[in-house]
Image: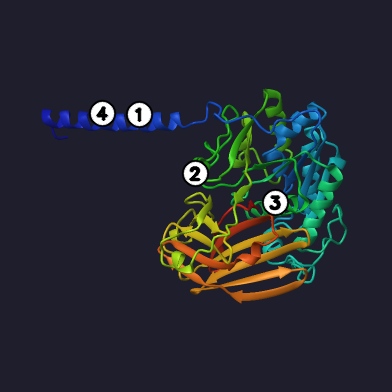
Amino acid sequence: MGLILPHMKHKFKIILLLILFATLAVMSYSYSHLPFYPSDYPAGPSLSAGDRVLVIAPHPDDEVICNGGVISYAVENHIPVKVVVITDGNDTKTSALVRHNESINGTQVLGLNEDDIIFLGYKDGSLNNLLNYHWNYNNPYTASDGSKQTNYPYALQKNATYCGSNLADNLRTVITDFKPTIIIYPSGDDEQYDHQATNGFVEYVTTQTGYSGSKYTYLLHLPPDWPSARSYYPEYYLNPPEQQVGLQNGPEWFVFNLTSYQERLKEKAMLDYKTQIPSTSYLMSFVRKNELFGHYPTINVSQSNIIIPKSDYTGGSKVPVNLFSDPVGDGKYQGKEQSLDITTVGMDLNLAKSWISIKTRDEPSPSGVYHVRLNLFRPAGVERAVITVENGKAEMQVESEGNSSAESIPLTIQNNTILLEVPSSLFTDHPYFTVNVDSIKSGAIYDQTAWRVVKVS
């Protein structure tokens, strides 16, 4: 072995000290970001004796993973609770019957009775298709087994047609019959398609019916690193994802703190979903000292009587006012294609013409497809409009009372902004509408915004 010279020993010591300091810095940073303490957010939902709570779950297990503590609290305090499970949960791991029984058993741990759980029986994985592509009864969704109606033995409506309108009718029936004062449903920023679509259905039905109670959303799927830490840490708190805090017209966050008993009961209930939530699952990250909920406020816009020249927009001197922001780097592909990463949606409503804008992180992709989806509510009925931007052109299709029309609309692309000129008549006599924007490439959804409710004044 060769000799180590004194100056080399000194150099090694310096290197070791630098490594030690770097390691300590990383550990200190990581430790400081672990959720040992509750978030500084208001408590909610606030439950009282006069409340009636409706929890809406896309799949059999969502009701407990994100809401088990709320359900347990409501049962303890004799507050009526109903759970609606929209799909049959018939994924590739198991069967619809097993998923049904897991849901019954899991919620019974929390104190619910079997008749407190309402199953609709739509196909697992189908909800985005029903909401966006198969809305009408004359264009039902065809499942992989060739069926176009529910064949689920526990469905609220037997032989329900696989279409969005039918699902909306089912939700409307449940809400009308149960009369909830609080509805808890998935966040529109959830990355799982059934969850995101369920958000769209709830916003549609509650806006159409003029529902006046409270609404709270829950977030479940937000890869790759939320919740933090992404494992079983029952001593931690569940905090909002950083990228969804402070957004323009973004969600208001609330925390629902659990007692030790409620947390243990929730964990026991979750483990009854044996096919979905083994003890090693990241879903055990939701066994925390609190549950987390969001509220998306209604966005107000004014329809101006001032006529603004088209050149003010296409010339670049004016852009529509931002309606809301979308988290940067979200979506299934985690912002890998910045041209498809939606950042803001804007709108100006004026006397003759109106404008809608979509901003992306980079110049819009020439191979991408962008959609603006609108549900426009008026006393006479609902108009559904879809604007498609593809290959440098924009087309708007409108469906109303069984009639459908399509027209090309002016499109301008300025840097990272898609600017669409739409007829202001589209918003006449529509005091409310819901809006959602998505980006697609090669048939895959890259990004999509939450469904937002907008009031026109």
Residue at image mark 3: 203
Q: Which residue is mark 2?
A: 243
Give the Cα distance between marks 3 and 2.
23 Å
Query: Where does the image place residue 16, in percent across and percent down from the top left?
Result: 25, 30
Give the CA distance from mark 2 to mark 4. 35 Å
Identify the element where label 2 is drawn. helix
Label 4: few (<14), some or many (≥20) within 10 Å? few
User: Quick one: 177 or 356, which is closer to the camera?
Assistant: 356
Q: Which mark is residue 24?
A: 1
Query: Which numbered disc flags the more N-terminal residue, 1 or 2?
Result: 1
**Local SS, label 3:** helix
The residues tagged by marks 3 and 4 sit, at their Cα atoms, a distance apart of 57 Å
Q: Tell which tag, 3 or 4, sits nearer the viewer.
A: 3
Label 3 Cα neighbours within 10 Å, binned few <14 / some 14-19 / many ≥20: many
Q: CA distance from mark 3 to mark 1?
A: 48 Å
Res 56 label: none
Q: Quadrant of residue 146?
A: bottom right
- Residue 155 in the image, given as x and y percentages of width and height: 85, 54
* Distance (Cα) linking label 4 and label 1: 10 Å
Taking the image as drawn, is residue 274 in sight?
no
Q: Earlier in the sequence, mark 3 or mark 4?
A: 4
Q: Is residue 7 above or below residue 98?
A: above
User: Which badge, 3 or 1, is on the more N-terminal residue?
Assistant: 1
> Are the residues tagged 1 and 2 within 8 Å (C-beta)?
no
Name which residue type carries label 2: Gln
Q: Position of residue 116 (x, y in %)?
A: 84, 40
Viewer-side residue, 226 vs 424: 424
Q: Nearer the viewer, mark 3 or mark 2?
A: 3
Q: Which residue is mark 4?
A: 17
